[in-house]
Amino acid sequence: MMKLSGETLRDPTAETTSVKRARTSPPKSLEGLCVGLFGIGKTRTPEFLDQVEKRLAERGLITKRFAKPTNAKTCPPEIMEQVVRECDVVLVGLSD
């Protein structure tokens, strides 16, 4: 929360504290990895991820689909934990 000339500005994210993590290096190849395709609930994201999934399948890559219930809410922890357990890399679909 920040005060600015009598107004209160609030952070719209769900984080109560910032989390700092070291950046993970991207893999040299996707071969043999499971690619998670994550929809954030925005309009047309499923169509975008359908095309990405099709292209990855053409290359013989394994994909798994995940999605938030709605774009207006944070992702439930159970879904995030499932993504972490089942996927090696994740592509987040931010399409409208």
Image: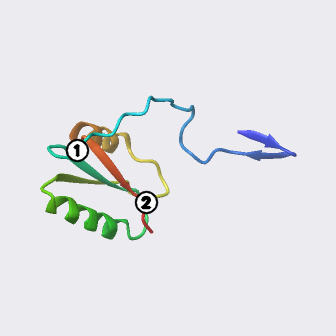
Residue for point 47% across, 52% down: 73
Amino acid under disc 2: Leu
Image coordinates for residue 1, horizontal then vertical, percent: 70, 39
Q: CA distance from mark 2 to mark 1?
A: 23 Å
Q: Nearer the viewer, residue 27 or 5?
A: 27
The mark closer to the camera, 2 or 1, is 1
- Disc 2 marks which residue? 94
**As drawn, 80 above or below 60:** above
Residue for point 33% across, 67% down: 48
Tag of residue 29: 1
Amino acid under disc 1: Ser
Q: Which numbered disc flags the more N-terminal residue, 2 or 1?
A: 1
Q: Secondary structure at mark 2?
A: loop
Residue for point 77% across, 45% down: 8
Say whether residue 95 is left or right of residue 54: right
**As drawn, 56 above or below 22:** below
